[in-house]
Image (tube, grey):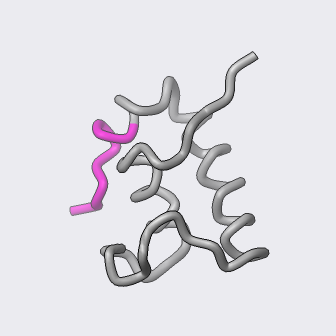
Amino acid sequence: MINPSIDQLLSKVESKFLLVNLVSKRVKQIEKNGYYQMKEKDYKSKKEIGRALEEISEGLIHIKTN
């Protein structure tokens, strides 16, 4: 089973399209800077995509709307 679940993520983000774009941008940031929102031992996932999803699930990434 995928953790965090899509239902849990969609409660934080309005649409799947926005979720994909948000994760994509966050993964690029992680790869460029190597900066994580949580301690590395607290992540369940080893890959940046999973870590970005976990950050969204934990509410560490905020979406700025105009």
Q: Residue at x 36, y 49 (%)?
A: 58
Q: Which residue lies furthest to the top in this view?
A: 66
At x 35% / y 29%, what residue is drawn?
11
Which quadrant is the N terminus positioned in?
bottom left
Look at the picture and state if 64 lies above or below 62: above
Percent of width and height locating residue 39: 42, 76
> In this rendering, would 2 be left or right of 47?
left
Task: Identify whether 10 is placed above or below 31.
Answer: above
Please, is residue 14 above or below residue 36 in the view? Answer: above
Measured as percent of width and height from the top left, residue 33 is found at 75, 75
Q: Is residue 64 left or right of residue 41?
A: right
**11 on left or right of 24:** left
Q: Is residue 2 magenta?
A: yes
Query: Which quarter of the rendered picture does the C terminus lie within?
Result: top right
Q: Is 22 or 61 nearer to us in this picture?
A: 61
**Residue furthest out toward the left:** 1
At which x and y percent is residue 27?
Answer: 65, 64
For the record, the magenta segment spans 1-9
Residue 34 falls inside the magenta stretch? no
Residue 25, placed above or below residue 38: above
Q: Which residue is drawn at 28% across and 61% down?
A: 2
3 sits left or right of 61 in the view: left
Task: Please give the count of numbered marks on the rendered protein.
Answer: 0
Which residue is nearer to you in this view: 16 or 46?
46
Q: Position of residue 42 (x, y in %)?
A: 32, 75
Q: Which residue is drawn at 45% across and 56% down?
A: 55
